[in-house]
Amino acid sequence: MSTPKVAVIMGSDSDFEIVKKCLIALEKFGIEYDVQVISAHRNPHKIFDYATTAEDRGIEVFIAAAGKAAHLPGVIAGITPLPVIGIPIQTSFQGGLDSLLSIVQMPSGVPVATVAVNGAENAGILAAQMLSIKYPEIREKMKAFKIQLNDEVIAKNEKVQE
Ligand code: RP5
């Protein structure tokens, strides 16, 4: 077990079913993570402490998932110098448009790299791509993954030609 490179934070345990897909993606690239439920609204002091100390604990990328008034990724981005990827969680309001806009519409100077509503797998892949700039072993796995994606579509194309 090495030190976690990615912090995966969700605003509620009700987000976990979606967030699991992100954890699976990180595992596929052999990336250690620290997963936590911390609410920006219900645990404001805890998220401040966590985000303030993350860099010293070896965290290099944040992934934050939240729904509704989804302030968690933006709050983390306001505290840490590390990149933050936001996962908007689907809600009963217009399919999660509330979550999406709360995460993507950040003020100038404080970006959150926002994936699609419930796009947890892509959040994990994007974190792996960020880390692959520094870690050659992750880069090699990413190259193999791209080849696999390409091959899968070619195989599906061949199947529809049969
Ligand atoms: C957000 O509010 C969470 O990220 C979750 O998506 C949503 C609802 O939370 P619960 O009321 O289910 O705990 O903070």
Image (cartoon, rainbow, N blue to C red):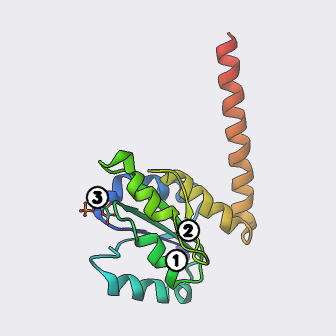
Question: Residue reaching furthest top?
Answer: 162
Q: Residue beneath label 2, please?
A: 112
- Name the residue at 55% across, 73% down: 107
Q: Secondary structure at mark 1?
A: helix
The image position of residue 21, as x and y in percent, is 46, 52
Amino acid identity at mark 2: Val
Q: What residue is disc 1 on?
A: 77
Asked if ligand 1 lies within 8 A of label 3, the reply is: yes
Residue 34 visible in this rendered orientation of the protein:
no
Residue 54 position (above or below residue 18): below
Whereabouts is ligand 1, in terms of quadrant? bottom left
On screen, residue 6 versus residue 67, left or right, reads: right
Residue type for callout 3: Ser
Residue 82 lies, in percent from the top left, at 59, 79
Residue type of the residue flagged with mark 1 = Ala
User: Which residue is disc 3 drawn over?
Assistant: 14
* Marks 2, 3: nearer the viewer: 2
Q: CA distance from mark 1 to mark 3?
A: 22 Å
- Tally of numbered tags: 3
- Residue 78 horizontal side relative to residue 145, left or right: left
Q: CA gap, disc 1 to disc 2? A: 7 Å
Kindly state the secondary structure of the residue where label 2 is placed: loop
